[in-house]
Image (cartoon, rainbow, N blue to C red):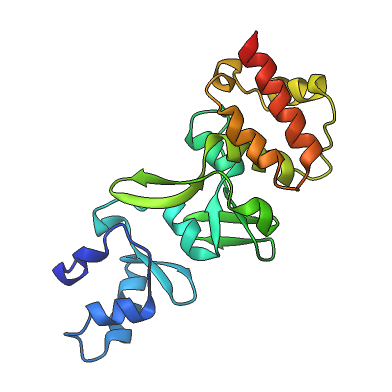
Amino acid sequence: MQSTLKKLEGQVFNHSVLVSQLGDYARPNDKISDMLSKAELVPLKRGLYALGAAGGQPLSKGLVANHLYGPSYVSSYWMLAYYGWLAERVEAVTSMCMTRSRHIDTPLGRFAYTTIPAQYYASGLTFVQEGGIAFMAATPEKALCDLLVSTRQLRIQSVSSMQRYLLDDLRLYEDDLYTLNLERLRRCANSDYKTTMLSVLARFVERVQND
């Protein structure tokens, strides 16, 4: 990998940034085509790239998700798996957004985005550090809430139903529920979006923590 591109290791960048780093080439677009053919560049979508596997620093899928479509943050199944809450492997990187729901297939895999309303969006966000790179993601509390609100036709109105869904269907470990911050769950429930189900979640977690 050329030394001029070292500063782009682990980053997601657009065509203009890439061309600026190839200033010594008379025909930078030809060089870009050559790098793509050699897998030295990963095409994420039109005009958006990352360095290939030979680029040194591993690429954060969370960072890629933030850049592919947004504004967005990584959440739901993928973040719960990232936090170690799900035993099953999660293939698609799941994110929440305020624009149209969609999925984007890339050489790195599928990135899925689900629409949520603005009043609910901002609660429970954090930056996750990964190899010196930070990406925007949900806290464990928000990731769990997002999984519930984004699951189609899921209607949970009782604590017993919530218990069955979380412990039997999702196979979460009850010990993990002790680590959740109840106040964060209540803030999500008070965001005027699927309030009933998220309030039931908060009540169930409170019961678990008080047992």
Q: Is residue 77 above or below residue 161?
A: below
The image shows residue 185 at horizontal and vertical percentages of 63, 34
Residue 78, image quadrant: top right
State the residue at coordinates (39%, 69%): 49
Question: Among all residues in the image, which is located at the extreme top?
Answer: 211
Quadrant in the rendering for residue 22: bottom left
Q: Which residue is drawn at 70% across and 47% down?
A: 191
Q: Which of 193 and 173 is in front in this view?
A: 193
Q: Can residue 115 be seen in this view?
A: no
**Residue at left 59%, top 19%?**
173
Q: In which quarter of the image is the N terminus?
A: bottom left
Q: Is residue 151 left or right of residue 79?
A: right
Is 168 or 121 nearer to us in this picture? 121
Query: Which x, y percent locates residue 174?
Result: 61, 16
Compared with residue 29, is residue 126 higher up or lower down, i.e. above or below? above
Q: Which residue is drawn at 72% across and 46% down?
A: 150
Q: In which quarter of the image is the C terminus?
A: top right
- The answer to whether residue 46 is visible is yes
Residue 147 picture location, percent across and down: 67, 40
In-image side of 90 versus 26 (left or right): right
From what the image shows, is residue 125 above or below residue 162?
below
- x and y, in percent, of residue 99 in the image: 66, 65
- Looking at the image, residue 43 sits to the left or right of residue 81; the answer is left
Query: Is 83 above or below relative to 60?
Result: above
- Farthest bottom residue? 26
